[in-house]
Image (cartoon, rainbow, N blue to C red):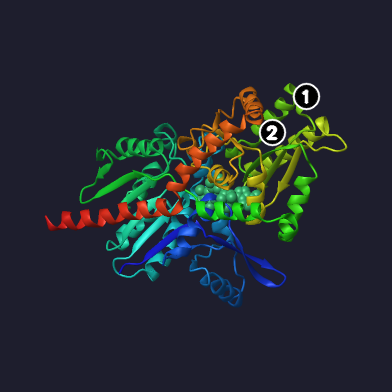
Amino acid sequence: MSRLIIASNRLPVMINRSADGMTITPSAGGLATGLKSYHKDSNSVWIGWPGVMPETKKEEKEVIGLLETEQCLPVFLNEELITNYYDGFSNATLWPLFHYFAEFTEFNESYWESYSKVNEMFADAIIENAEEGDVVWVHDYQLLLLPNILRERRPDLTIGFFLHIPFPSYELIRILPWREQIVNGLLGADLIGFHTYDYARHFISSVKRLLGHDVDFNQIKLENRQVMIDVFPMGIDYEKFESHALEIQSKPIQDRSKEHQDIDRFLLSMPNRKLILSIDRLDYTKGIPQRLNAFREFLMKHPDYRERVSLIMLTVPSRTDVEQYQNLKNEIDVLVGNINGEFGTLNWNPVIYFYRSVPFNNLIELYSSADVALLTPLRDGMNLVAKEYIASKVNKKGVLILSEMAGASKELGEAISVNPNNIPDTADAIYRALTKPDKEMEKAITAMQQRIKRYDIHKWASEFMKALNKTIEKRSEHHAR
Ligand code: ADP
Ligand code: G6P
């Protein structure tokens, strides 16, 4: 029986060094939060970077021990690789370019060299652990070269690849000095998956224009094999969100855990106040300044809503060593301060802002209590937060405002859709959401719940694996001919 090896830069857990030794915490970001439910239930091993650099052999052993309990294996990166591969090529070259922020994209040979080196290191770690005929599932933009490295070194492996971010139009890819290597790197896979048809279409067009390969519908024809391209919109662990939300709802406040009581007291302290929620990593792709400006415009246009609505904004620190992220943090701090200074009163903060990760239970509590979720990325591969909000709305009272630039908007057609660059329109959307009749809310939430419940994380992973296994059958047919 072949085994599954998952490979991604970010593991589902992060290891941190503390005064008491190494500690383990869950990772944020859609790849880790989504895939971990599948990983837990499958007999897979997950290889990736644990987020810490051990300084001694003893520390290294400690990290390996902690990861073992999570079925994970580490690839350790030194400081230079973190700077050039992670902060550099991954997050200052590919991330901005693939999200249409060409002006933020840095081209640097040292970044590229480290990126190639780390992709080789991942291949070493996989090959060390892979038995004949195993299946390897590679994830995301940090490992675009890995499929082809594996293909050359271990042709017996079946290789799947899934991209969690947008694949941009050819006009963006063509500006990258290493564009052919990147596209060729991916073609080492047997199956390449994307969240949406648009991303798949952009990829196929780049393959044709950069490498000149023949394409037959969703099959790329190489000299001696084929690569399948398909669309798998990532889902969430629906049952987990729904059941936690039901549990919270069914317990009276005094029976709830301390964390819940704290949030409940906070929510109860604002009776008759509507709650708008936004949750994301602090990232320039998420459109956070635009969102704050839209909220400000809403308060200007609708003074009767002052003191009657608050925006709770949770942002998780992300990629804090990259300049653009530091600049954005400063911009957000100023904007939040300005809005609270301009409109706030002794009893009311218009924006309640947290710059940290929150525990899962609190997340659910906030999802289920929020009247509106305001999710306005400028570009987003999928946006799982939108699906998590819908799944947690067990009482069906809530409205989702979702950017049309998020992959999730393709599946969540009943949400109020906005172009996040259109500030007046987003301000109007907030008003429409707050005044939406209960019946309409219920109808929209029910339709979206049915859809994302059906295509949850388990369905997503099993559909991908099914399609990947089909490529094995095709390969044997090809060889038999
Ligand atoms: P991205 O992958 O770009 O970060 P997604 O919306 O797809 O965006 O996924 C974000 C994931 O991180 C979600 O599962 C969400 O629950 C989690 N997350 C985001 N912000 C926080 C936060 N402040 N605290 C805890 N988890 C968070
Ligand atoms: C997005 C990316 C993931 C990444 C996550 C968190 O979801 O698609 O690959 O893991 O953001 O970012 P980080 O840089 O902390 O891993």
**Looking at the image, residue 388 lies above or below residue 204:** below
Q: Residue at x 35, y 67 (%)?
A: 3
The mark found on residue 292 in the picture is: 2
Q: Is the Cβ of the residue at disc 2 closer than 8 Å to that at disc 1?
A: no
Query: Dot 1, crowdedness within 10 Å: few (<14), some or many (≥20)?
Result: few
The mark found on residue 369 in the picture is: none
Query: Dot 2, crowdedness within 10 Å: few (<14), some or many (≥20)?
Result: many
Q: Is residue 23 visible?
A: yes
Nearest to the observer: residue 14 or residue 174: 14
Mark 1 belongs to which amino acid? Pro
Nearest to the observer: residue 40 or residue 419: 40
Q: Given the current orientation, which residue lies at the most extreme bottom position?
A: 58
Residue located beneath label 1 in the image: 303
Q: Is residue 363 visible?
A: no
Q: Is residue 137 left or right of 154 when viewed as pictured?
A: right
Q: Position of residue 75 (x, y in %)?
A: 50, 65
Nearest to the observer: residue 157 or residue 368: 368
The tally of labels here is 2
Q: Position of residue 377 (x, y in %)?
A: 57, 36
Q: Position of residue 81 (x, y in %)?
A: 54, 58
Nearest to the observer: residue 27 or residue 96: 27
Q: Residue at x 28, y 48 (%)?
A: 227
Mark 2 belongs to which amino acid? Leu
User: The residue tagged with tag 1: helix, strand or loop?
Assistant: helix
Question: Which mark lies nearer to you, 2 or 1?
Answer: 1
Q: Position of residue 50 (x, y in %)?
A: 55, 63
Q: CA distance from mark 2 to mark 1?
A: 16 Å
**Looking at the image, residue 423 lies above or below residue 327:** above
Q: Is residue 53 left or right of 224 when viewed as pictured?
A: right
Which comes sooner in the sequence, label 2 or label 1? 2
User: The residue tagged with tag 2: helix, strand or loop?
Assistant: helix
